[in-house]
Amino acid sequence: MKYDSSARNVSASSYLKHSVLALLLAAIGYATVPIALAADTKPALMLANIYSPSTPLADYWVSEKYDGVRGYWDGQQLLTRGGQTINTPVWFTANWPTTPMDGELWAGRGQFQKAVSTVRQQSPDDAAWRGMKFMVFDLPAEPGPFTERLSTLNNVVGKLAVPWVQAVAQNKVTSHAALQSQLKQITKAGAEGLMLHRGSSLYKGARNDDLLKVKTHDDAEAKVIAYISGKGKYAGQLGALLVEVPAKDGAAAKRFKLGTGFSDAQRQNPPAVGSQVTYRYRGLNDSGIPRFASFMRIRED
């Protein structure tokens, strides 16, 4: 969708027409971007909260945070976090177990866009998938606590014995200082951050403190509400996105401008109204609005 400075707001009806037209074009072979149709239900996945230095670390396992596309193997097919089917080459999922696996489809450190591009293809690019790995970090259907699930996970992945399916390595730290040291070391090597997983936790398809992300900055997601026209250098292009963070824990929904972090190409062809974007920030001001918010990427799933 090209940016139109004369139409800062895109109505729900025009957005719907655009989506329907894209589906029709895909059906007759004229669409240039593959469209994945959502499954009937989204998988109930465990989602992470943000780490706090006051978190007691004794019961947590620590692992690398892989910057890829969340993948859920339901025992028969791979799905995104949003419930869309991921089309892979036959060999990629050959002989995978009927045991559900939760993990990240990863193309390597700093290769997020490559992972997204590979996963989005309706006709899988065999060569691109040769560079992908499925980093498995949990088994949602296993009934025991995470520490016990780890043993089963390593056995399940070990029996597959293929290099593109790997069990995520887990370790322990005893202090906040040790965790920060590990975070500094791994981000310097190009990783996105760390994850903490409570050893005593059962798998719950919800966002909670059993899973925590540790990063050098905070990030969150928001819905694109409208476009704000640029000025000066960006006249005739996107100046900022008006985005909305949904209501949570009794707090009202918040709207704010997201005006930095965009490439020139993104200012000319910004994220669609109604889409979800990820932004980074440094804490919240007194009104609950993110401070120094900067666009990172469109949430693809």
Image (spheres, rainbow, N blue to C red):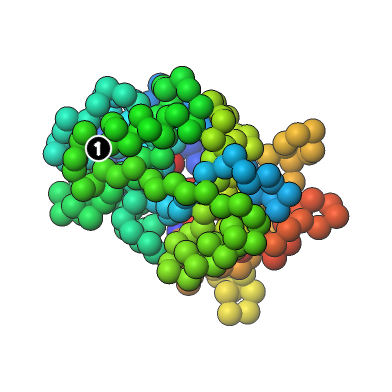
Question: Residue placed at 27% from the left, 36% from the top?
Answer: 157
Quick one: quadrant of the C terminus?
A: top left
Question: Residue placed at 28% from the left, 48% from the top?
Answer: 133
Q: Position of residue 122 (x, y in %)?
A: 24, 41
Q: Nearer the viewer, residue 108 or 32?
A: 108
Q: Nearer the viewer, residue 35 or 21?
A: 35
Quick one: quadrant of the N terminus?
A: bottom left
| 212 relative position to 165: left or right | right
Q: Position of residue 272 (x, y in %)?
A: 50, 50
Q: Is residue 45 above or below residue 270?
A: above
| 127 relative position to 48: left or right | left
**Can the viewer see residue 48 in this picture?**
no
Question: Residue placed at 54% from the left, 35% from the top?
Answer: 199
| 11 relative position to 81: left or right | right
**Can the viewer see residue 170 in this picture?**
yes
Q: Nearer the viewer, residue 110 or 287?
A: 110
Amino acid type indicated by mark 1: Gly
**Quarter of the image where one finds residue 292:** bottom right
According to the image, label 1 marks what residue?
158
